[in-house]
Amino acid sequence: MEGMHHDLIFRFIEMQALILSPICPHLCEHIWGLIGKKGSIMKASWPTVSEVDEVLIRSSEYLMDSAHDFRLRVKNIAQPQKQKKGMPPPQKPTHGTIYVAKTFPPWQSTILSKLKQMYQANNGTFPENKEIVNQLKTIDTLKKYMKKVMPFVQQSKENVAVNGMRALDLELDFDEKKVLEDNLEYLTQTVDLEGLEVKFSEEGDAKVKEECCPGKPYSTYYTQPSVSVTMVNPQPGSGFFSFSLPIMQHDTLPKITHRMCKQERTIKNPNKVTLYYYDNPELGPRSMPRYDQPTAGKTSVPMNGIFNIDVNNKIVTMTQNGSSKSIGTQLVYIIE
């Protein structure tokens, strides 16, 4: 069950079997035995409910909402709604950076603090927008942001209606950078990119600092240069075909095999893929293949091999233990 948490899945099955046992006793008894439980399910204790971790739930909702926003942003970049005629389609991003903010921009912090004061002074409700505007426009630090003030106020009021007064807090009650970093592998897969990194907004440009705020990460994306090589499978009758695969700077064996699985759906498990390069990258691809010895004249790509590319000359090399080896234009892959 690659990609799924074994213990979590079996815990779910166990709980469902216990809950359904009064209704479907024979089926649940059978499932109870399949998951390795001893004795009868009729003698098992009813599931107990632990205290709900509200902070964990909010961090989970934050992760799901952020992943949705990231997918939409990547889609809009790769498939823009408005594109000039005759222009080539934009390249699909391969990498991205997610920025998170420790604090709100000063003008937003000022508004949130003022809204909280108004809300508490008005017996748990917001005053009319006209009164809010009159109070906010007297604050000097907000004068150059007045076009943005009321849209932000309206958004904040809507957040309060959904999430309560904590929507006006200046800090989150969980570490959003840690939440994103702990789930970086999931985010990379769901956004369909080669790599993601998480940084604080202070490391970004002026736009990042302006757009990013606690609970609302800001993401940027780019396409990393690559050189394409032909992947060849010499196994007779295997059903695996040749295809072109991009190789990027500082690629490793795991990165390449995972990219192969993502691009070619017939290749299911990257751990069952072994890569080979030709001992002679010039003559090797031109030699008659030997189906009885498909790896003859080839050397397996080591786990510590680092690939390097020369984009201008379309050259791929591999470095291992300080020595460099030319790869040529083809790599061979074997599926166990």
Image (cartoon, rainbow, N blue to C red):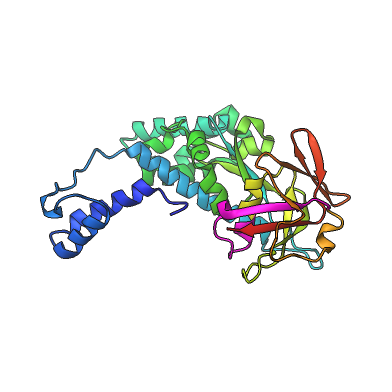
Above or below, comparing residue 80 to residue 326 in the picture: below
Residue closest to the far left: 43
Q: Image point 56% across, 51% down: which residue?
A: 271
Quarter in which the C terminus is drawn: bottom right
Query: Is 269 left, or right, of 295 in this rendering?
Result: left
Q: Image point 81% across, 56% down: which residue?
A: 329
Q: How many labels sit on residues?
A: 0
Numbered range of the magenta stretch:
260-280
Query: Is 22 left, or right, of 77 in this rendering?
Result: left
Q: Position of residue 12 (x, y in %)?
A: 30, 52
| Residue 195 visible, this orientation | yes
Above or below, comparing residue 78 to residue 225 in the picture: below
Viewer-closest of 231 and 247: 231
| Residue 192 visible, this orientation | no
Query: Is 224 left, or right, of 96 in this rendering?
Result: right
Query: Is 318 left, or right, of 130 in this rendering?
Result: right
Q: Does 29 appear in magenta?
A: no
Residue closest to the far front: 292
Q: Position of residue 57 (x, y in %)?
A: 36, 42
Q: Position of residue 243 (x, y in %)?
A: 71, 64
Q: Image point 71% across, 41% down: which residue?
A: 305
Residue closest to the far right: 313
Q: Position of residue 244 (x, y in %)?
A: 73, 61
Q: Image point 51% across, 39% down: which residue?
A: 180
Quarter of the rendering containing residue 321: top right
Viewer-closest of 148 and 236: 236
Quarter in which the N terminus is drawn: bottom left
